[in-house]
Image (tube, rainbow, N blue to C red):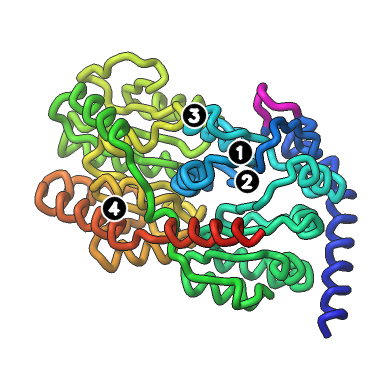
Amino acid sequence: MRSRSGRSSRLARWLYSLTITLLSPLIWWRVWREWAPTHRRRERLGFIQVSGSRPRLWLHAASVGEVVTATPLIRALLEDHPDHDLVITTMTATGAERVRQTFGDRVAHHFLPLDFPGSARRFVTRLNPRLAIIAETELWPNLLAACHRRNVPVVVANGRLSAGAFRLYQRFGALSRGMLETIAWIGAKSALDADRFVELGAPSARVAVTGALKFDLDVDEATRQASRQLRASWGPRPVWIAGSTHPGEEEQVLIAHGVLRRRFPDALLILVPRHPQRFDEVNAHCLEAGERVQRLSAGSALTASTTLLLGDTMGDLMKLYGCADVAFVGGSLTPVGGHNLLEPAALGVAVVSGPHLDNLREIADTLAQSDARVQVENGQALGETLVALLSDDARRHELGEAGRAVVAANRGALARTRAKIAALLNDS
């Protein structure tokens, strides 16, 4: 049985490799724009340059969201294993920029190679890590196979499988099983995620429920101080933020701001689109809507007539959340699946979201059950909620403190994950 399973997995991976090779022109076109001037595009084919003789740890975080989630783990790895070089890979250029801004030269960065068999083998051979860590769940069959061939243990940290992702992996059962059977350990966000990994073929002994790494979010004092200083410079006006918004959400956010300003004419909206390539587009849309916009990148002080601050810089979302009285977290009024609700919650800022939260359902439900999140269905309802919260200091404070308490009560995934990584390194 095991032999037949192995043959079917190898056949599935061969068919997968054939397919992506045939689609390579389209794949290459798609990633061509995900580039940074400090990196050669040849990295996408595994042609990386490594230096030094120290052992290496490799952590992959696909994009900005995964980098943010993995930041406490990255800091822990730097602290726990100072005798190792830490290499971070990302799939996107925005993720690369976030790594650079957060960690500078404390870590090395490369773009993840495309999952062609030769590219994967070349990358793993050249990097030669002692351990590979995948933040969340971006599993590439040929990269995992290359790690397995070179006896590189692979850890999935903060592992999650949404209902949609689970169904997709189920469709390719042999390929999924072949990948998951080679992984040394999976730290799942929830029991539901753990069950899904096991059902897809991960050995149950190698799957543990750790909780969500996002709860171990650490807001440093420098960020808190920057928030206080920036907010103080704006004077005593109501401030709310819409963070990580997507197309279709900005229109709803502007409707909400209009409702709020009818009650609080001096209210300020901080609007932070999720993707930097949309900054100019969103800025133009806000101006067309009649907002008096100032861009954060301009670096000048706000005037009393400014109605909207466009957060068009990278790496400043936490600082901007800390400036707000209420935070709406985007990706939730449109069917994107939601973004990190815990960032404003950790700061004690009242959290509001839309209903589309499939990417973080357990976290969203935990916040709602603790009366630490308000859900709205559209821009009009968001505006009415903002009016209610900004008219009731006690309720707003209660909501923010409940969110802070949820974050504090659910910490622990980081400690469990770093302990397992240490054990695997000791055994290798």
- Kind of residue sitting beneath label 2: Leu
Q: Which mark is residue 101?
A: 3
Question: What secondary structure is marked by label 4?
Answer: helix
Q: What's the residue at 60%, 65% (across, down)?
A: 185
Q: CA distance from mark 1 to mark 3?
A: 18 Å
Q: Is residue 248 visible?
A: no
Q: Position of residue 124 (x, y in %)?
A: 77, 46
**Sequence-first tag of 2 and 3:** 2
Q: Position of residue 32 (x, y in %)?
A: 74, 33
Q: CA distance from mark 3 to mark 4?
A: 36 Å
**Sequence-first tag of 1 and 2:** 2
Instruction: Tell me whether circle 1 and circle 3 mark residues in contact (CB < 8 Å).
Output: no
Q: Which residue is mark 2?
A: 57
- Kind of residue sitting beneath label 3: Gln
Answer few, some or many: residues within 10 Å of disc 4's Cα (few below 14, many 20 plus, some between 14 and 19).
some
Is 36 magenta? The answer is yes
Task: Please indicate whether residue 369 sits to the left or right of residue 287 in the image.
Answer: left
- Say above or below: 85 vs 164: above
Q: Main secondary structure of the magenta part?
A: loop
Q: CA distance from mark 2 to mark 4?
A: 47 Å
Question: What secondary structure is marked by label 1?
Answer: strand
- Kind of residue sitting beneath label 4: Ala
Question: What secondary structure is marked by label 2?
Answer: strand
Q: Which residue is mark 4?
A: 381
